[in-house]
Amino acid sequence: MNMKSHDITLHRIIILSAKTAMSYCVFLIFLFTVPVYDAIQEVGGISQIFKDKTHIVLGDSALIVEIADTSAERARGLSSRDSIPNGWGMFFIFDKPGLHSIWMKEMNFPIDIIWLSDKKQVISIKENVSPNSYPTTFEPAREALYVLEVKSGFVQENGIKLGDQLTTF
């Protein structure tokens, strides 16, 4: 009887190992499909994929965001980039609530700007902000603690509206 239970345990280990290997293969295939691979290259390669990034959900839409929580990172923002992939954004975290303004200095593509309260609720939105608008600055209708910059059209395509809640995972 002891030998038989040992065989069953070994059998389970082999099956679990095979399932794990298959899952890893599926992950790699997904990771290197053309759209995903292009997005990875756009943000600086696989080593940069998870560096200073997190996942958020706004409304019903999930995004991977780069965190800008220092004054230098917030000043640079998305400047000097050629574009931002779909499903990506930059999430600005300020030290305290305020009328934090955004400009389009050295930007090469239009964006949607979403300001959020200290409770991470959408309080102001500016859509399709053009790089040509620089040096104009854009600020929220009331004090915000966070700002989310995303590819132009994101707000409309995803039905983002005032009061929507942002969550992280």
Image: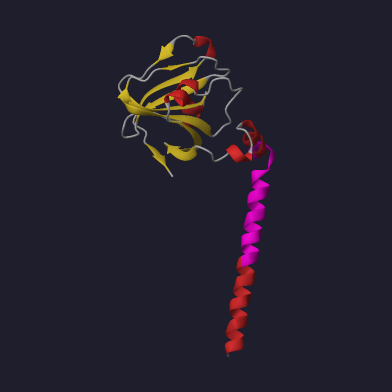
At horizontal 47% and vertical 9% (from top left) the residue drawn is 135
Instruction: Tell which of 71 and 79 is nearer to you.
Output: 71
Decide: is 160 above or below 126: below
Q: How is the structure coloured here?
A: secondary structure
- Span shown in magenta: 17-36
Which residue is found at the position 48% from the left and 40% from the top?
Answer: 55
Total marks in image: 0
Please identify the quarter of the rendering in which residue 44 is found. top right
Task: Characterize the magenta stretch by its predominant secondary structure.
Answer: helix
> Is residue 53 among the parts visible in the rendering?
yes
- Up-down: is 20 above or below 12? above
Residue 151, given in percent of the width and then of the height, sits at: 53, 26
Image quarter hosting the N terminus: bottom right
Residue 60 visible in the displayed image: no
Give the image location of residue 65, x and y in percent. 49, 34
Q: Is residue 151 above or below residue 166?
A: above
Q: Where's residue 127, x and y in %?
A: 46, 20
Residue 129 in percent (x, y) is at: 49, 17
Using the image, determine if residue 127 lies above or below residue 91. above
Q: Is-magenta flag for residue 71?
A: no
Residue for point 57% across, 27% down: 84
Residue at coordinates 60% horizontally, 67% vertically from top-left? 16
Q: Quadrant of the C terminus?
A: top left
Q: Is residue 63 left or right of residue 42?
A: left
- In this picture, residue 89 sits left or right of residue 140: right
